């Protein structure tokens, strides 16, 4: 009896260890594919998201997608050289507001999902690379495929996405010009304020729609 | 008296022009972000505003009505114009030295014009002949012609000097615009424009929501988008100097952090001075 128990315990333990190892060593392309498949499976079944429920789409993104994104890195990329002027508190505030803006606007895209098929291109990377691009293509009947690429870098316990490029356009660095304008006009605090205002305005339009 | 008045008029005109010019100059100072590739920013912003209004009150509403058409009809319209476009796309692939792609484009036109019933159905894609996206602006880019200053064209939107030159060639080679019968030409050109606009419904609200300043958002979008097109989807990954700068003192010690905080407190004063000017 004790023998079987200890055997079971050993089995469970080794399984657990293996699982943890899997989560750590998961390749960047497998990570992107896993998350994408997961999210699409949910959207396919969720009538509310399909009919334009932004709040539910945001919820889905927050639980399933955000853990794999590095928003501090994304914000630094978007702000560019002005990032050096920002104090640690300002950096935190910028990251928070930029994250809110990105999640609000692009979660909406999920509500427009209509049976598109996502192709994953073979990953062109060496095992020792710590910065890779995972290329995908969204195919839809009667339309040209849209290229969506994810830039990831290795961070201790796994890979994190720090940029998304749609048709070659980085959703992150696309902000650099306007962020630069804001910083020149009102300093880092001016940029934080503009982002806050923008998010507030989006919040009210979401509520007005409901 | 009468004489006096007529003498005054030219002066009033000159004064008016001068005032407008000064006003433009002032707004130029206030508005210009000083983007190195956008020396014409004040003019571009004005055209951009015009386009926004034209889109808001005319083009978008018409596209919304068109969007009520059943999907098979819209697909058919897209396929038909797509097939006509494939000829010029093939020529551009040829000009860029991409023989395989050019052959594939030629094959697409043959298949879709015959089996695809004059382009109504995109059989070629089903057969594995992928649709490409080329124009003379991209060909010039492949040949090494620089993009030149950013330029917003009336109605047509974002462009640059190189792509505008390319567009002139595209128009010369466009079977729709060059069609002899004026009525057909005009309605076909209009339908194509509305079809293209309807495809962007949805994406436009995302851009609207995402942008802090829609003009610079669209400008940056266009520059990245065209670079990606010239390199057929895989532009070279260039070193991001701005990010290198930002990263330089990322593991910052408290001393550096404090220095940064100082820099921030002095910056707003400078900035407000500038914006008052």
Image (cartoon, coloured by chain):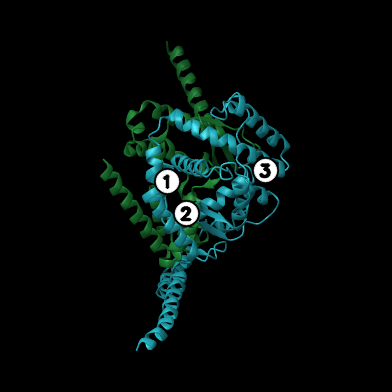
- Find chain B in the image and tell me its colour: cyan
Q: Nearer the viewer, residue B198 or A98?
A: B198
- Find chain A in the image and tell me its colour: green
Instruction: Tell me: residue A141, above or below residue B275.
Output: above
Position in image of residue B245 (x %, y %): 56, 60
Q: Is residue B124 left or right of residue B183?
A: right
Please give the count of numbered marks on the rendered protein. Answer: 3
Position in image of residue B196 (x %, y %): 48, 41
Q: Nearer the viewer, mark 2 or mark 3?
A: 3
Q: Is residue B109 left or right of residue B272?
A: right
Q: Nearer the viewer, mark 1 or mark 2?
A: 1
What residue is at 48 percent from the left and 30 percent from the top?
Answer: A116
Give neighbour class at mark 1: few <14, some 14-19, many 20+ (Cα, 10 Å). Answer: few
Helix, strand or loop at disc 3?
helix
What residue is at 30 percent from the left and 44 percent from the top?
Answer: A206
Helix, strand or loop at disc 1?
helix
Q: Is residue A83 left or right of residue A89?
A: right
Q: Earlier in the sequence, mark 1 or mark 2?
A: 1
- The residue that mark 3 highlights is B92
Helix, strand or loop at disc 2?
helix
Question: Which of the chains bears the disc numbered 2?
Answer: B
Query: Looking at the rendered structure, which numbered label has been put on residue B204?
Result: 1
Is the residue under label 2 in contact with that under label 1 (CB below 8 Å)?
no
Position in image of residue A17 (x %, y %): 50, 27
Give me the C-alpha separation between circle 2 and circle 3: 29 Å
- The residue that mark 2 highlights is B217
Give me the C-alpha separation between circle 1 and circle 2: 12 Å
């Amino acid at each position: 009896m004790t023998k079987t128990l200890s055997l079971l315990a050993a089995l469970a333990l080794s399984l657990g260890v293996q699982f943890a190892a899997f989560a750590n060593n998961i390749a960047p392309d497998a990570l992107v594919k896993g998350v994408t498949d997961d999210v699409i499976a949910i959207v396919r079944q969720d009538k509310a998201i399909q009919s334009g429920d932004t709040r539910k789409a945001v919820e889905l993104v927050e639980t399933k997608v955000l853990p794999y994104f590095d928003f501090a890195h994304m914000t630094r990329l978007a702000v560019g050289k002005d990032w050096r002027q920002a104090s640690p508190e300002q950096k935190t505030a910028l990251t928070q507001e930029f994250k809110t803006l990105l999640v609000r606007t692009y979660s909406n895209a999920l509500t427009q999902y209509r049976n598109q098929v996502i192709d994953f291109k073979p990953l062109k990377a060496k095992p020792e690379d710590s910065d890779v691009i995972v290329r995908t293509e969204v195919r839809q009947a009667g339309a040209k495929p849209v290229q969506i690429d994810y830039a990831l870098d290795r961070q201790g316990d796994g890979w994190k996405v720090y940029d998304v490029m749609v048709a070659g356009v980085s959703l992150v660095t696309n902000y650099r010009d306007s962020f630069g304008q804001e910083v020149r006009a009102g300093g880092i605090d001016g940029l934080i304020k503009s982002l806050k205002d923008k998010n507030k305005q989006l919040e009210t339009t979401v509520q007005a729609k409901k | 008296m009468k004489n006096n008045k007529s003498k005054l008029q030219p002066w009033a005109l000159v004064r008016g022009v001068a005032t407008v010019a000064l006003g433009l100059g002032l707004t130029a100072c206030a508005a210009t972000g000083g983007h190195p590739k956008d020396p014409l920013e004040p003019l571009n912003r004005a055209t951009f505003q015009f386009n926004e209004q034209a889109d808001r009150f005319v083009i978008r509403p018409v596209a919304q009505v068109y969007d009520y058409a059943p999907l098979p009809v819209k697909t058919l319209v897209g396929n038909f114009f797509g097939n006509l476009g494939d000829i010029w796309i093939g020529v551009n692939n040829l000009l860029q030295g991409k023989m395989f792609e050019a052959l594939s484009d030629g094959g697409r036109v043959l298949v879709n014009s015959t089996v695809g019933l004059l382009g109504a159905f995109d059989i070629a894609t089903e057969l594995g002949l992928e649709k490409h996206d080329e124009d003379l602006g991209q060909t010039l880019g492949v040949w090494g012609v620089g993009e030149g200053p950013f330029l917003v064209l009336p109605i047509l939107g974002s462009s640059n000097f190189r792509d505008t030159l390319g567009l002139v060639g595209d128009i010369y080679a466009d079977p729709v615009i060059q069609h002899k019968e004026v009525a057909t030409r005009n309605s076909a050109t209009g339908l194509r424009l509305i079809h293209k606009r309807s495809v962007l419904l949805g994406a436009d609200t995302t851009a609207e929501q995402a942008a802090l300043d829609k003009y610079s958002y669209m400008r940056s979008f266009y520059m990245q988008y065209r670079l990606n097109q010239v390199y057929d989807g895989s532009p070279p990954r260039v070193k991001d100097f701005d990010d290198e700068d930002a990263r330089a003192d990322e593991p910052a010690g408290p001393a550096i952090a404090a220095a940064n905080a100082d820099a921030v407190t002095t910056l707003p004063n400078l900035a407000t001075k500038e914006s008052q000017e």
